[in-house]
Amino acid sequence: MAFDWLFFLEVLIAGLLSGAMYSLVALGFVLIFKASGVFNFAQGAMVLLAALTFVRLVEMGAPLWLAGVSTLMVMVVLAMLVERLVLRQLVNQAPIILFMASIGLNFFIEGTAQGVWDSDVHALDLGVPDLPIDVFGMLISQFDIFAAAMVAALVVVLAVFFQKTRIGRALRAVADDHQAALSVGIPLQTIWVVVWSVAGVVALVAGLVWGSKLGVQFSISLVALKALPVLILGGFTSVPGAIIGGLIIGAGEKLAEVFIGPFVGGAIESWFPYMLAMVFLLFRPQGLFGEKIIERV
Amino acid sequence: MFYREAGQFKASYAADQSIFPIAQDRFGVLVILAVAFVFVPLVANEYWLRSILTPFLIFSLAALGLNILTGYAGQLSLGTAGFMAVGAFAAYNLQIRIPEIPFILDFVLAGLIAAAVGILFGLPSLRIKGFYLAVATLAAQFFLEWLFTRVGWFTNYSSSGVITAPPMVMFGFEFSGAQSRYLLTLSIVAVLALAAKNMVRSEIGRAWMAVRDMDVAAEVIGIRLLHTKLLAFAVSSFYCGIAGALWAYVYLGTVEPQAFDIFRSFEILFMIIIGGLGSILGSFLGAAFIVLLPIVLNNVSSIFAGGTLSAHTLSHLELVIFGSLIIFFLIVEPAGLARLWQIAKEKFRLWPFPY
Amino acid sequence: MNLSEFGRNSIWAAIIAVPMMISPAAAQQFIPVTTYDTGPYAVNGQPFMDGFVDYLKMLNARDGGINGVKLTWEECETGYKPDRFVECYERLKNKGEAGASLFNPLGTGLTYAVIDRAPQDKIPVISLGYGRTDASDGRVFPYIFPMVTNYWSQSTAKIKFIGQKLGGMDKLKGQKIANVHHDSAYGKETIPVLAKQAEIYGFEVTHFPVTHPGLDQKATWLQIRQYKPDWVILRGWGVMNQTAIKEAARIRFPRDQMIGVWWSCAEQDTVPAGAAADGYICAGFHAAGQDFPLIQDILKHVYDKGDGAGSKKAVGTILWNRGVVNAFLSVAGIKTAQKKFGNKVMSGEQVRWGLENLNLTAADIGSQGATGLVPPLKLSCLDHEGGGGVKFQQWVGDHWEMVSDWIETDQSIVRPMIEASAAKYAAEKGLTLRTGMSLGSECP
């Protein structure tokens, strides 16, 4: 049988679209890591909190815009609490300690979100039908295209925010060098609140997209796992890295599963992205877009 | 007043190099061992032995293994559960296929097999560093989990992929009761903890710490990086492998590959961070914190609040408290629970006249 | 409690300050309720446990317990993790006057974790429609009860149903079936029986494993699109189900040719999938809905007094009803035991006798207002399953509609496989079989 190039292309497109959705989660990690040096384990829980708050408000009869704004406020309050109660207390600690603190935060948010709302599953309909459209005999999901468009829009908004606004420039300064930023009068604590809030916004978008795909429930916090190989491949500090990394991982894992999987028993999607990322890293140890590591003795 | 080194003179090199140079420490350790070996089996009931202390010891062993790799040699690993799975499945297959080998030897062999796998996945550590190294161990984690799920040979073609441990018999004695199993685990953990303590204060341990602090500098002073890093991976995986075998045989008696998933790896990583990186004691304290605290919370809440709050709310409240306590302890002492204990000891040395 | 045990307990209580071993004093039948309110499967665990507890509450409120013995219970959070479940099991097994009556692990992996322990502690474990299939052989697994129908029996009913839809079992020849399964003990359980059935009926089956939690299944479904099966069997759990249903819609696979197992068959799986779930068919071993006198009693005696374990919304949904059925069968076992041992608190061993001699006739079920909700069952010491049937239901927009009668399972296929598998297990474990019996002989 001749190799079915059309099917190959279909798998590739599906993979890239999945990858865009992984990037969406990875973005939140990158933002926080850049500005506050925390590998934020709680990102998945933040996605859950945002989506759950949103969907419950909608169920209570709030219009979409109001639910969105209220959820954003919840995420900003969360950012303020995190800064006040966690980050400020742990200034200058090693990255691994901050990582552990974010794990505590993860349990805290998970418990609170589900305790306040509930741990049932909620349907979320954003009004975009999840139906395929035919393109030369390939089936491509409308919803995935919508999600990819959301990711693109989000990246543009973030880029403008970082490049053009005053606070965005301050953010980049902090990301480059905390102490230098402090010395020119940038208020570090405000910056942290802003960054965690922005990550909250990203979490909300991710929560809406994944939530309408899977239903809003605890499991959407597990999408954070999907972001891990993306981060490692793209570099923890690079927004373009998160996007490109996501696309490579998404396409790579789908192609591997469909074309290699059947020969080895299937379900290789679970480890293939890591093997892929590892091979990349052997050649570029700092990730695709990570800053070059310079070691001095 | 009671805890101080004054008046204890070291007259020989052997005395100077002993594990616990202070008499009070030696005494303390002996008391702990005596309590663990004699007192606990006598007074603890089955619930405590079987479902609290045994898993606690097994987790401590796994945490010890990870602490050697991450805490001492500075190589971040998220594949601990994968190496535990290797140990569990290796022990099972050895016993099913070569029943002549006594099961204790099976455990050691299982540990060695896990060590070999650990070396294999440790190879990228020569090139990839820091958080990025996690990818190699994550690859190990997911690949091994997949391997044991998909390849029927490892589970002796059990339809559901679950293995059940054969009985553990040695010299005609079957380890089936809660007490014998607890003592078996305790003995293995005690021996391995002692070995670890000695290892980290020997040349190997110092080489590990040099690599952790700065591997380029370590290389400059003549430490062979390849050798040292891979040795850390091997020793760590050996410990984890034995922990996995114990988990399958002594604790659950049955195991599916999903018992060793990524969340188990995270759990063990949490233990060493909260307990204290680069501390033997910390591994035990961390395991106690992460394993026992949720159980204690669950028990306490069902006793004190069972009637007033719904079960649903309680389970979530437990998560909230657990998370808050993690953050609280990190703020109090970022270097881990072991450090808290050290501070307490310092205070006690000066007590009651702290001037 | 003897003196030395008392001593031990008080020492431990004093040392750790967590008083775990306080036993209630009154004459009450203790039923442990292990559940999961947290983690990825809480969505399914919660309504199940609510139904279970609601039934017990109703019995206490309406009848004052069973035959004058009050029921008492305690919840324990397992998080769907075998090790947490083992801790719960050990904690609760000695509670109550005569210890725990029985356990309902609510998870296949969880059931596996106590298969060794249950016979030692003499506490029966009911795995209602899940768990280890070959445990239906009561000679090798005296304390494990995969009741109503196990996975293999269910699989035979499913193939029969497909045969019915095709208009005859001979039409199965040449059909292509894709088995999309959760890559765990639970998901893999039917692989051998499907292989056997494929051999008998001449259809082709291909297995598509999905790794937990199954958030993204595009690759799997693209493969299915390429494979072009006639039927898809779905064995998912939790979030995997609605994702699978949605992915099926994306490749335009007809949902009425998708047959789910009963754990892929609740409102929690179809509602989030939205319109994609229309026409989806799946199996059940009990009915949905509130139109049963038994459930009306629960509403009257529990919910109307504001004492419900969960929200009233859940009453009548599949998983809530399954919780009720689970509790119903547990209590039926205890009642049967009471007939022999007297109307007092039953021990685990006595409850096991009750379960093995359980004979639920249509009349019994009718007298308790559960006709149609619970199928008639008869267990024996050889057969721990009971020979229940399977009903198929279809999702039509916002509710389930029954699309079949009770379909009998095909024991001529299942039973020999169960016995062979159980014998292999017994050999591997070096088990001595129950006294008075050997493999292949009848019950004494």
Image: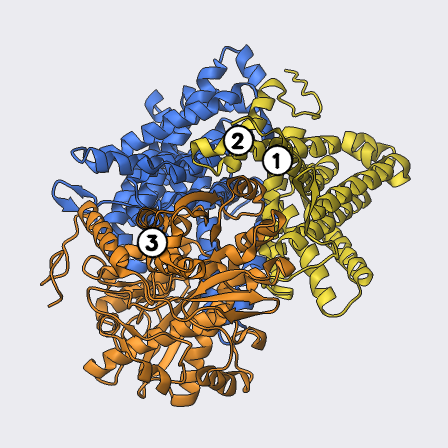
Chain colours: A yellow, B blue, C orange
- Residue name at image x 56 percent, y 63 percent: C268
In the rendered image, residue B137, in percent from the top left (x then y), is placed at 50, 31
- Check disc 2: other Cα within 10 Å, few if <14, some if 14-19, many if 20+: some
The reply to whether discs 2 and 3 touch (Cβ–Cβ < 8 Å) is no
Indicate the amino acid at tag 1: Val
The foreground one among C227 and B178 is C227
Find disc 1 in the rendering and name its residue. Answer: A11
| SS state under label 3 | helix
Indicate the amino acid at tag 3: Ala
- The answer to whether dots 2 and 3 both sit on one chain is no
Find disc 2 in the rendering and name its residue. Answer: A259
The reply to whether discs 1 and 2 touch (Cβ–Cβ < 8 Å) is yes
- Residue name at image x 48 percent, y 53 percent: C236
- Check disc 3: other Cα within 10 Å, few if <14, some if 14-19, many if 20+: many
In the image, is residue B240 above or below residue B290?
above
| SS state under label 1 | helix
- Disc 1 to disc 2, C-alpha distance: 10 Å
In the rendered image, residue A130, in percent from the top left (x then y), is placed at 68, 52
Mark 3 or 1: the one toward you? 1
In the image, is residue C340 above or below residue B344?
below
| SS state under label 2 | helix
Indicate the amino acid at tag 2: Phe
